[in-house]
Amino acid sequence: MTETDKMLATVADGIGTMTFNNPERHNAVSLEMWEAAGSILENFASDPAVRVVVLTGAGGKAFVSGADISKFEDERASQAAYERYNAAVDRASTLLSDHPKPTIAKIRGWCLGGGVGLATCCDLRIASDNSRFAVPAAKLGLGYAYKGLKKIVDLVGPAYAKEILYTARQFTAAEALGMGLVNRVVATDDLDAYVQDYAVTIAANAPLTVAAAKVAVGEAVKPDAERDLARCEAMVNACFASQDYVEGRRAFMEKRKPDFQGR
């Protein structure tokens, strides 16, 4: 399924892939792309065939290089246009952060500004060894919203977050790995196969168990008073009451791979 020619969506082998398809501008994101991304993420959330979501960029040179500045005169010139743009960004980012399925950012090449923001909204980030990261807001005079900034702080801690934001410089994939900005760095030629295998592995696991783990981890990083422990407990109980729990036990005893159905 395709939302626009700048945003592509496919589903195969339990994996929903959303591709930022603006390679001539290093996958810089315009308003229409942000709006389409929100629709794609909603579709993936409601599609039982999708067990894992992968974000990637077209063209081989960039994941996402940030906002499409060439569109600013049209898309962010007035207060109304600015508010519409920000609403689309916030909607897509929130849908990604709160997505019920595991999410993976497959990062090759440039990952700049809003690209870093998108990557930090994902559960996991796997980068090629030729990737480069930067949040260049300080070189453009832009303000960086708290919501996105906090995700960077949550991943790398305050000291590295300050380094990223104060210097606005580019970081190598190795530096990003050392800071905790990405989970894995692999050879450029191996990235597609590695992420595919990674996603297939997750997709083959019990969906209810994975979903319960995602919610529990999300609650664990909240302040004590804000944690919804009842929801965590209910999701764990749903796992034990599921047919997948029966299937998992039987498969183990029969020495075969389980066939989980998510119910």
Image (cartoon, rainbow, N blue to C red):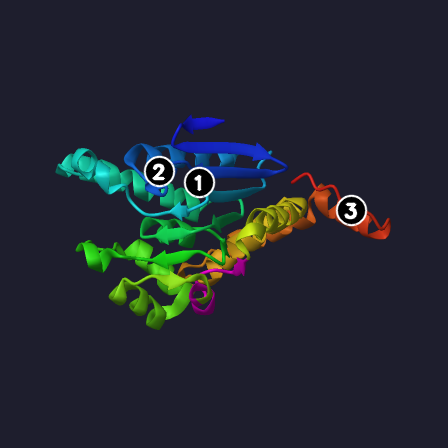
SS category of the residue bearing label 1: loop
Which image quadrant is residue 25 in?
Answer: top left
> Where, by quadrant of the figure, is residue 85 drawn?
top left
Q: Residues within 10 Å of mark 1 (few under 14, many from 20)?
A: some
Q: Amino acid at mark 3?
A: Lys
Query: Residue pushed farthest bottom?
Result: 159
Residue 192 on image: x %, y %: 56, 46
What percent of the width, then of the height, locates residue 252? 81, 52
Q: Nearer the viewer, residue 82 or 185?
A: 185
Q: Is residue 251 left or right of residue 198?
A: right
Q: Which residue is mark 1?
A: 59
First in sequence, mark 1 or 2: give its number: 2
Farthest right residue in view: 254
Type of the residue with mark 2: Glu
Question: Where's residue 50, x and y in %?
Answer: 57, 37
Q: Which residues are magenta?
A: 175-186
The residue carrying pointer 2 sits among few (fewer than 14), some (14 to 19) or many (20 or more) residues within 10 Å by Cα, namely few
The residue that label 3 is drawn on is 257
Report the disc number at residue 24. Answer: 2
Question: Residue 34's x, y, as percent?
Answer: 34, 37
Whether residue 223 appears in this view of the structure is no
Q: Is residue 208 left or right of residue 105?
A: right
| In the foreground, 163 or 220 | 163
Q: Are marks 1 and 2 in contact (CB under 8 Å)?
A: yes
Disc 3, disc 2: CB below 8 Å? Answer: no
* Gap in angstroms between the C-alphas marked 3 and 2: 43 Å
Q: Residue at x 21, y 58 (%)?
A: 139
Q: At 39% from the left edge and 51% from the top edge, which residue is drawn?
A: 110
Q: Which mark lies nearer to you, 3 or 1?
A: 1
How far, Cα to Cα, is label 3 from label 1? 36 Å
Cα distance, mark 1 to mark 2?
8 Å
